[in-house]
C-alpha cells in the first residue's frame, strides 16, 4: 500500500474509534449514519486507489515537509543564505576593471577624484562629472584653489565646479547659456579640456605643438586638432585599433580617472619657466630716470641766475673780445 493509503486508513481508524466512543456514550445514536460515514471513507480510499497513485490532492514530498518530516523547517534562513550571493554579484558589477584598480587607487591618493565617480566604473562619464575631475587636476598642479565666479552664465546647471572650470577657460557651454551637464563627454572634448587645464596652470606647459597622424583625422573637429596632437604625443590619449583615435567615442568613468591621474603624474614635476615679458618693467626703469636728470640741470642753472639760453651768447661775447684784442695788436 502506498503512503497515502496508509494515511487514509489511519484516518478511518480514528473516525471509527470516535464513532465507537459516541455509540457507547449515546446508545441511541443512529448507527446508520455511522455506517454511511464509513462507506464514504472507504469510497474515498477506493477512489484514490491502494497503489499509492496520486489523486486530486498531492501528497507532500519529503522536501516540502522538511528534513524532520513535519514541514517546520526554518524557511527564514533561506533568504539569508542568498543575500551574500546577491551582494557579491552587486559588488562585482560595481567594481572597477582589474587594469584600472592601481590607477584609481593612485588618483584617490593624489586627491584627483570625487565620491560621485567612485561607482559604476564602466558607465560613460558625463560632462559634469569630468568637469569636477579637471578642476581637481588644476588645483593639484597649480597649488591654487579654483575661484567661483560671481555670475552663473548657464541656465541648466548650478554646479560650482562647472562654473569654476568655465571661469578658468577650461570648458565652454554647447550654447551661450546651456552647458548640457548630463551629456556624455567625447574623447576629443576630453583632450581639449586637458589641454586647456594645462594652459590655465601655465601656458608654458603647452608651448609645443604636434602633428596629428591618426587615420581618422577627418573625424576630429578643427577645434580639437591641436589638443589631440599634444595629448597623444605626450602619451596620455592613445590611439585604438588600426591607428584610430575615435574622437567622437565616449569614455568610461574608470578610463577618465586613469587619464586624469596620468596627466597629473606627467606634469606634476615639470618646472614652469617664467616668460621674459615679465622682466620688461625692470628693464624700463633707467629710462624713467633720464627726465629727472634734465630737470636737475635746469634747476642748477636757475639757482645760479643763469638761463640755458643765455650760455651761448656769453661765450660769444668772450670770444668776440679776444678777437678784437688780437686785431688791435696787429
Image (spheres, helix red, strand yellow):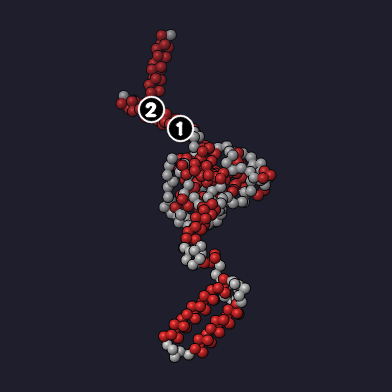
Looking at the picture, tell me which residue is in the foreground, 237 or 212: 237
Instruction: Please name which of the two marks, 2 or 1, marks the residue nearer to the observer.
Output: 1
Eyeballing the image, is 7 above or below 81? below
Residue 221, horizontal then vertical, whole percent:
62, 49
Residue placed at 44% from the left, 33% from the top?
Answer: 281
Residue 228: x and y in percent read 60, 44
Query: Where's residue 196, x and y in %?
Result: 53, 44
Q: Locate residue 47: give its quadrant.
A: bottom right
Q: Are marks 2 and 1 in contact (CB under 8 Å)?
A: no
Task: Indicate left or right for 213 with 9 as reference.
Answer: right
Neighbor class of circle 1 (other Cα within 10 Å; few <14, some 14-19, many 20+) is: few
Position of the C terminus, as image quadrant, is top left
Which mark sits nearer the N-terminus, 2 or 1? 1
Residue 8 in percent (x, y) is at 54, 76
Judging depth in this view, the residue of 113 and 4 nearest the camera is: 4
Residue 175 as seen in the image, left or right of residue 312:
right
Q: Residue, x 55% and y 56% (percent of image)? A: 183
Q: Secondary structure at mark 2?
A: helix
Residue, disc 1:
279
Which residue is more in the foreground, 28 or 138? Answer: 28
Residue in front for this viewpoint, 314 or 129: 129
Residue ID for mark 2: 293
Instruction: Mark yes or no: residue 168 visible.
Output: no
- Determine whether 98 is above or below 24 in the image: above
Please name the residue shown 51% across and 40% down the image: 264
- The residue drawn where x is 52% and y is 67% is 65
Amino acid at each position: 500500500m502506498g503512503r497515502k493509503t496508509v494515511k487514509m486508513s489511519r484516518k478511518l481508524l480514528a473516525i471509527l474509534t470516535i464513532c465507537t466512543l459516541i455509540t457507547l456514550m449515546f446508545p441511541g445514536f443512529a448507527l446508520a449514519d455511522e455506517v454511511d460515514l464509513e462507506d464514504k471513507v472507504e469510497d474515498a480510499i477506493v477512489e484514490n486507489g491502494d497503489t499509492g497513485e496520486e489523486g486530486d490532492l498531492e501528497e507532500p514530498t519529503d522536501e516540502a515537509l522538511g528534513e524532520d518530516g513535519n514541514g517546520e523547517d526554518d524557511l527564514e534562513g533561506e533568504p539569508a543564505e542568498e543575500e551574500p550571493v546577491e551582494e557579491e554579484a552587486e559588488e562585482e558589477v560595481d567594481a572597477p576593471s582589474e587594469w584600472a584598480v592601481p590607477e584609481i587607487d593612485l588618483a584617490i591618493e593624489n586627491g584627483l577624484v570625487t565620491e560621485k565617480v567612485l561607482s559604476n566604473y564602466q558607465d560613460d562619464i558625463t560632462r559634469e562629472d569630468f568637469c569636477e575631475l579637471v578642476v581637481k587636476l588644476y588645483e593639484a598642479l597649480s597649488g591654487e584653489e579654483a575661484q567661483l565666479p560671481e555670475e552663473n552664465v548657464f541656465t541648466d546647471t548650478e554646479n560650482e565646479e562647472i562654473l569654476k572650470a568655465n571661469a578658468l577657460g577650461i570648458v565652454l557651454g554647447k550654447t551661450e547659456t546651456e552647458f548640457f551637464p548630463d551629456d556624455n563627454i567625447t574623447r576629443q572634448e576630453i583632450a581639449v579640456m586637458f589641454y586647456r587645464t594645462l594652459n590655465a596652470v601655465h601656458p608654458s606647459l603647452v608651448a609645443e605643438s604636434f602633428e596629428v597622424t591618426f587615420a581618422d583625422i577627418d573625424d576630429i573637429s578643427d577645434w580639437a586638432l591641436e589638443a589631440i596632437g599634444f595629448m597623444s604625443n605626450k602619451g596620455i590619449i592613445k590611439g585604438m585599433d588600426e591607428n584610430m583615435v575615435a574622437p567622437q567615442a565616449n569614455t568610461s568613468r574608470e578610463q577618465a580617472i586613469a587619464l586624469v591621474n596620468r596627466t597629473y603624474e606627467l606634469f606634476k614635476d615639470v618646472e614652469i619657466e617664467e616668460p621674459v615679458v615679465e622682466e620688461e618693467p625692470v628693464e624700463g626703469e633707467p629710462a624713467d630716470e633720464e627726465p629727472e636728470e634734465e630737470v636737475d640741470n635746469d634747476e642748477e642753472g636757475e639757482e645760479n641766475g643763469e638761463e640755458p639760453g643765455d650760455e651761448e651768447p656769453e661765450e660769444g661775447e668772450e670770444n668776440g673780445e679776444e678777437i678784437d684784442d688780437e686785431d688791435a695788436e696787429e
